Image: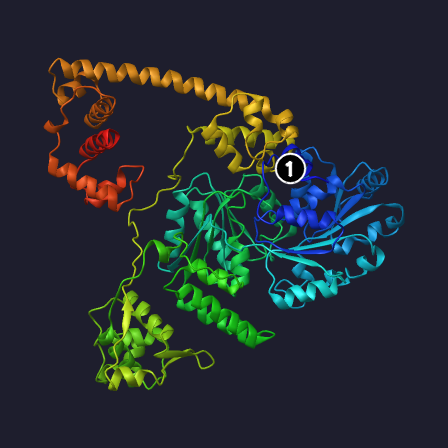
Amino acid sequence: MTQTILHAKLKDHFGFEKFRPNQEEIINCVLSGQDTLAIMPTGGGKSICFQLPALVFPGITLVISPLIALMKDQVDSLKANGIQACFINSSQSEEERQFYIESLQSNIIKLVYIAPESLSFLDNLFNSLTISLIAIDEAHCISAWGHDFRPAYTNLGYLKKRFPSTPILALTATADKATRKDISEQLNLINPKIFIASFDRKNLSLEVRPALDRVKQIIDFIQEKPNESGIVYCLSRKTTEELAEKLQKIGINAKAYHAGLDNKIRSTTQDEFISDDCQVVCATIAFGMGIDKSNVRWVIHYNLPKNIEGYYQEIGRAGRDGLPSETVLFESYGDVIQLQKFASQGLNAEVQLAKLERMKQYADALSCRRKILLSYFGELVTENCGNCDICKNPPLFFDGTVIAQKALSAITRLQETEPLPVIIDFLRGSKNAYIYEKGYQNLKTYGIGTDLSWFDWNQYLIQLINLGYCEIAFHQQNKIRVTAFAKKVLFEGEKVQLTTVQKITIDKQEIKEGKTKTVTNSLFEILRKLRYEISKEESVPAYVIFSDAALRQMETERPMSDQDLLAIDGVGKAKLEKYGDAFIKTIIDFHKSKVVKRKKEATTYKETLELYQNGFSVEDIAQKRKLGLSTIMSHLAKLYVDGAAIDLSQFITNQEVSKIAEAQIKLESPNTLKPYFDYFEEKIDYGKIRLALAILEKENAVI
């Protein structure tokens, strides 16, 4: 088959002009009949690697998938693209299963999804069906080395014996060398071609924050994104419920999800999240692997994850459509203690403790976080990513020798018998009952650190632990002990470089119920609402209609004909036929409304200009037009940029313009005025900022 035909099928059925990295090579390998193992990150486009070959092969493509929700999502998406597909599992009635089995026998269906536990439903039919391709999704489940071991997968090795001439495509998002070898051997793959895609998800920003008032931080974060879906991963079931309840109380549509909830509640929550009826899910790691939702815009980790593999898969559930998405990880000393205890009591404790240590090293890192993640999976890069908190705000180092000496002396005076909180209380001269009961107030170094806050001492002590000057004795009630390196600081004059503590600014203003921001007037939001309404009519997730990426492209390019809409990524012939008229009409209506609005604006600007030219002051113009002074200033700024003869120097000095020009460079030309207002600590008002930016815009246009 020529590549032209493959590209045509990609556009006609899936709406894409070109393949993502590795997709075309994997598809060609599968079509040649060779067994294949594909390691591709979450959101990397694994599904097309077997869905497109299914359209080419004469027979049926059998897809082994672990979760019912994942099967349903993919089948809904295939049907929306005009491709016949079904899933068969134990949740269906006998009549439903029989209907799909008859459809398979009649060669009506091209792809059938089935869980490994349900393969027996098709066992008697295999001799009468032409199986052209077997795709095994989440293939790491077959491996005892994998981080998500699932016993039923271990029986799939018989498929190669049953269908020796049928190619098998095994797919997973994360697998180290040992796991890849184990997958190939257990599936009996014959000389498999192995593809390892880049794990670099450039659209995901990476951030780690101290867990200082994290509930407040999470609330602020979500309220800045009123229409964006997200997941908050929590370590305990109790935390998911408590956090969801706190979010609900202030008007955020949030639900809890964990394995201890009733099956019906879990299913309803998952369906509502997929269908955009629930904005936020507060979940344990039980939630996510079966979610094919492409428009998750952010993922927050309330607690430190147990290992980098799990963390990477969980953040990978954000931004599957390729649009910019955010990930935030909260780290606390308490989380480390708790996870250390869990790991030491579980199976394979040594390995789990080592993986936890790697996770902690990532969270404590002072270098590009993406480099650390990629190197963990064997992918080495030289350039910093520019899209993590470390790259955006490189840490500032200072001589922390005195701080280190005070801390290490305190640990020594306490005879290395106390955990971190007690050491901090001792340094700060706390007068609590425990300190006095132990008589610590009588020791020489008691209270030598009163000049620093509890939070600062906590952060500096963690840095000293990370630098190796002291350590946590996890198996002895988390006592802090000094190491051999501490002697160099205490007695040999070694200098210690610490980083400035980055404080998270918490707005102390009370959050009032229902005060979340709303965004309704952009074309994206209007198209998003239309998509939601259609999804309700068709009982499918909204992103099955069109992805956020497709809507964003429509917002930018504003297609007003069938041909224009077909040029949007994700719009194929089937979707054009189903949804084209509704979306084109909405875009045309929006365009017309904008034209009307621009005409009204032109009229109101003209009235302001006429009054200005007749000698009225800005205060008189505002009073005469019954508008705010800042509105009149914005009119004058716009008129000035458009070429009107207005002398703005009467309202703003050259020195003020220069200051704002400097701020523009430092702030990297923000799109709104508030960053400037905050930068100048509210000493330059919004009106002057608008005028200065107008002057600078016109100067740049002339240059």
Where is residue 413 shown, x and y percent of the image?
Answer: 28, 85
Q: Residue at x 53, y 52 (%)?
A: 316
Report the quarter where the C terminus lies: top left
**Residue 434 location, quadrant:** bottom left
Against 451, residue 687 (above or below) is above
Q: Give the vertical position of 135 relative to 235 (above or below).
A: above
Which x, y percent locates residue 124? 88, 51
Instruction: Name the secondary structure under disc 1.
Output: helix
Q: Which of 86/221 is in front? A: 86
Quickly name the residue at label 1. 7
Quadrant the N terminus occupies: top right
Image quadrant assignment for residue 285? bottom right
Dot 1 amino acid type = His
Residue closer to the observer: 406 or 450: 406
Number of numbered markers: 1
Q: Position of residue 235 (x, y in %)?
A: 51, 61
